[in-house]
Image (tube, rainbow, N blue to C red):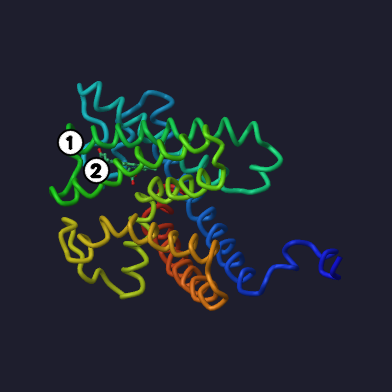
Amino acid sequence: MTPTTYLSPAVRMPRSALALKAASIFWFITVVIGQSLFVAYILSLYGGPTVTGHFEGWSRNTGLFNGYVAGDFTGNAMFGAHMMGAALITLGGTLQLIPQIRTHARTFHRWNGRVYMVTACVMALGGLYLVWVRGGYFHIPGALAISLNAVLILAFAFLTLKHAIARNIAVHQRWALRLFIVVSGVWFIRVGLMGWIIINQGPVGMTSNMDGWFDYFWVVGSYLLPLAILELYLRARATGSALHKYAVAGLVTLATLVMAVGIFGAYMFMWKAYLWP
Ligand code: HEM
């Protein structure tokens, strides 16, 4: 028995692995703060009108494509379900990633996971309805990009469930992380746009119709870039050398700092006015 046997796993971890773990914790805490603000905004703006049946109140958000449309029962129901699902899935997703809940509250983790996956599929299919039936898009490339996001949500939900049922827990966890990223795509869009504006001190490559070069890039980059960073993280964690782990820890930290700037911008310029009217 070596002297290190008595130490806790965290202390025995090589420094490079600790750096990667610290970066992932920093990322997760920042995401929790940013997504909690998004949930608060959703509930504050859409919760009251949805629960009380005063659907015309949705249109307080003047940036919507449609929101409430008099006489469009199906469309309004789809929009209301989309808003309540948005709050549920954003809250539920962060709870799924907390290791202590996974270990000590397994029943909750399983049920929350089932609700999360069903909600993800409802959001993806309902979102496709809002885009293609209700015309909720600026332009066809944007509509196709968010539709690809919806298809990835459906595919990753299927793979997450398949590996959970097969008890391939390590593979299940990797697909669950990918699912979390694509479900968070609409959040990354908002946070990324605001971060970009603040860092550049203005809307470089952006227009009010979302057809600037950065708008085109970010409508797919909002989920493909975080997915790429996640893959680098998973590879570094599983098989990376010390240098590889340090490099990815640095990348995750940098991306998180940019994300924090974006969260600040989204809170100040998109959400705050509805949270503290
Ligand atoms: C799964 C995670 C998703 C969340 C959390 C989410 C959240 C939201 C929120 C909060 C809004 C209201 C706009 C605002 O106040 O900022 C919204 C609107 C909208 N969402 Fe989603 N969404 C998700 C997925 C999707 C997907 C996958 C699509 C398309 C395939 C989609 C299509 C739309 C459309 C078209 C609107 C605008 C409706 C209108 O303006 O009338 N959403 N979403």
Q: Is residue 78 above or below residue 206?
A: above
Which class describes the residues within 10 Å of circle 2: few (<14), some (14-19), or many (20+)? some
Q: Quadrant of residue 56?
A: top left
Residue at the spot of label 2 = 147
- Residue shown at 35% from the left, 37% from the top: 154
The image shows residue 33 at horizontal and vertical percentages of 53, 55
Q: Nearer the viewer, residue 198 or 100?
A: 100
Q: Is residue 241 above or below residue 99?
A: below
With 175 as the anchor, is 101 left or right in this view?
Answer: right
The image shows residue 238 at horizontal and vertical percentages of 54, 61
The image shows residue 219 at horizontal and vertical percentages of 25, 56
Separation of marks 1 and 2 at Cα, in angstroms: 9 Å
Q: Nearer the viewer, residue 258 or 155?
A: 155
Q: Residue furthest bottom?
A: 243
Q: Is residue 155 above or below residue 70?
A: below
With 245 as the anchor, is 15 left or right in this view?
Answer: right
- The reply to whether the residue tagged 2 has its Cβ within 8 angstroms of ligand 1 is yes
Q: Nearer the viewer, residue 87 or 104?
A: 104
The image shows residue 205 at horizontal and vertical percentages of 20, 69
Quarter the N terminus occupies:
bottom right
Amino acid type at circle 1 is Trp
Q: Quadrant of residue 259?
A: bottom left
- Residue shown at 47% from the left, 65% from the top: 260
Earlier in the chain: of badge 1 and badge 2, it is: 1
Specify whether residue 43 is in view: no
Q: Are the residues tagged 1 and 2 within 8 Å (C-beta)?
A: yes
Residue at the spot of label 1 = 132
In this rendering, which labeled residue sits more in front, label 1 or label 2? Answer: 2
- Residue shown at 71% from the left, 40% from the top: 104
Specify whether residue 8 is in view: yes
Amino acid type at circle 2 is Ser
Q: Quadrant of ligand 1?
A: top left
